[in-house]
Image (cartoon, helix red, strand yellow):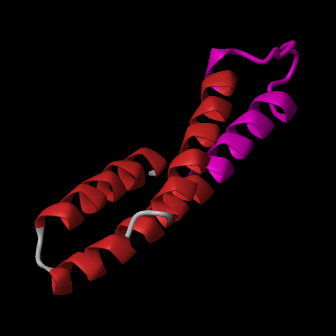
Amino acid sequence: MACIFSAVSAICLILSLLLSDKIRSIILIVGKVLAFVALITGIIGTAVGINIMTNFTAGVDYKWGASSIIGIIAIIINAIGAVVSIFIQ
């Protein structure tokens, strides 16, 4: 879901450059809100995934794999994108 929200947010922010002022303000607000929704869903999804792998894999020695690291990097990139979207006017 976080990937879908991020893509829709980017599309909304790009469309806000091309449309008239009345529609532009609505789409700009939607883009900003979706950026933060993507951040929150990404944090929740990554935390749940890491928690499941560390606590519910019986008899398996779990190490931080590539998926955990990529998830954390994606959260950092989403956080930067959400902060930058605030400054778009």
Q: Is residue 83 visible?
A: yes
Image location of residue 23, percent across then percent down: 18, 81
Q: Residue at x 68, y 26 (%)?
A: 68
* Nearer to me, 16 or 33: 16
On whether residue 13 falls in the magenta region, the answer is no
Dividing the picture into quadrants, the one containing residue 60 is top right
The answer to whether 39 is drawn above or below residue 20 in the figure is above
Image location of residue 9, percent across then percent down: 35, 58
The answer to whether 55 is drawn above or below residue 29 in the figure is above
Q: Residue at x 12, y 63 (%)?
A: 18
Helix, strand or loop: magenta stretch = helix
On whether residue 46 falls in the magenta region, the answer is yes
The answer to whether 10 is drawn above or below residue 67 in the figure is below
Dividing the picture into quadrants, the one containing residue 71 is top right
The answer to whether 59 is drawn above or below residue 4 in the figure is above
Q: Seen in the image, is 71 located left or right of residue 9?
A: right
Image location of residue 14, percent across then percent down: 23, 55
Q: Seen in the image, is 24 located left or right of residue 13?
A: left
* Nearer to me, 50 or 10: 10
Q: Quadrant of the C terminus?
A: bottom left
Tally the numbered discs: 0
Extent of the magenta region: 42-67
Q: Residue at x 81, y 33 (%)?
A: 56
Q: Is residue 37 visible?
A: no
Image location of residue 77, percent across then percent down: 56, 39
